[in-house]
Amino acid sequence: MPVDPNIAGLLQLIANSGLPPVAEGTVAQARAGLRTLMVDFRDASTLPAVASVTDTTIAGSIPARVYRPEGDDPRPTIVYFHGGGFVIGDLDTHEGVCRLLANDVGAVVVSVDYRLAPEHRFPAAVEDAEAAVRWVVEHVAEYGDDAARIAVGGDSAGGNLAAVAAQLAHAAGIELAAQLLIYPAVDMLGDYPSRIENAEGYFLTLSDMHWFGEQYSGLKYDDPAAAELDRDPRMSPLRAQSLAGLPPAVVATAEFDPLRDEGDAYAEALAAAGVKVEHQQFPSLIHGFYGLELLSPAAADAMAWCNAKLKDLLG
């Protein structure tokens, strides 16, 4: 199946924009590019309405934004980590995603503005993710007020952080209710066919992935030290010795995504470890579809599937 025609138009627009590829530009250019795509191009009136949106600080110093849907507590709480290769993205770029997630699931969503590389390299983002989850667990009465229904979620790099946070929470005896992993980066230096098949032309490129990884780790992609770091499950959660006992998971991947195969592999590894998994690889879609619901009906349907499956897991 070819790329969704609506998304193909976006890819052509990006190609004709004159902006340098992420891997050939500066960090500032990459951050500005994502904000242009996800914030500046979007009419604020199209953002899904929610009962309230509150900017706050959690775990002492981590900025966060809390989205509350209509309705009364108790309800689930989702701790959400935005994508962007650990380098770009922020609370604003994922505003629409979090509003829709809150409404679709009927949950309070706590969007976490974790520290970004290269200013703050690994494991800073992991430390923030772990601290954010612990904070929400300890203060759940201020959010959804249901300690039995706390989930983590994220897309791309945020999916990595959600998977890692779920592992760290389980190791600490914190039982989360679910995890939402949207095209997660789970094996940073893995060798997969999808990284070759989808290396160019589908928004996220293999060169971009290498660049993001170098910003995050501080190591060149082919540095032997990078291979050593890749074995750390806080960097590559697929490398964990055991996935048994982790919370039920929704795992979504896309056909035209270099991260496709590792996301599929993580879903398979979770299931093999006895974890309940809802997994779907979406044909015709690219990395970044989670947030393109206004552009592509196929993306909207995929997002609806992800959010509905998470709602089912949260009861």
Image (spheres, rainbow, N blue to C red):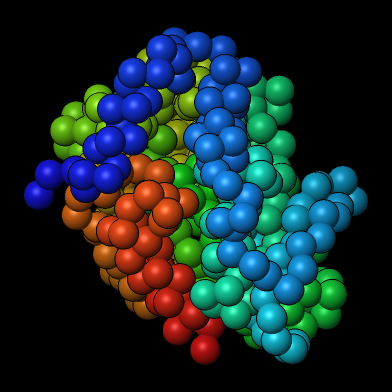
Task: Answer above or below: position of 255 versus 314.
Answer: above
Quick one: 233 or 129, which is closer to the camera?
129
Which of the 4 image quarters holds residue 18?
A: top left
Q: Position of residue 180 (x, y in %)?
A: 48, 64
Quick one: 165 or 303, which is closer to the camera?
303
Task: Answer above or below: position of 1 versus 11.
Answer: below
Left/right placement of residue 99 relative to residue 260 reads right
Q: Position of residue 249 (x, y in %)?
A: 43, 70
Visible residue check, residue 247: no
Which residue: 58% across, 47% down? 43
Q: Position of residue 165 (x, y in %)?
A: 60, 57
Which residue: 81% across, 60% down? 54
Which residue: 75% across, 87% down? 73
Left/right placement of residue 269 relative to residue 88 reads left
Q: Residue furthest left?
A: 1
Q: Position of residue 236 (x, y in %)?
A: 45, 43
Which of the 4 image quarters holds residue 216?
A: top right
Query: For the image shown, how many numbered marks are present on the structure?
Result: 0
Left/right placement of residue 92 relative to residue 131 reads left
Q: Residue furthest right?
A: 60
Task: Answer above or below: position of 214 versus 108.
Answer: above
Which residue: 46% across, 51% down? 291
Quick one: 83 or 267, which is closer to the camera?
83
Visible residue check, residue 60: yes
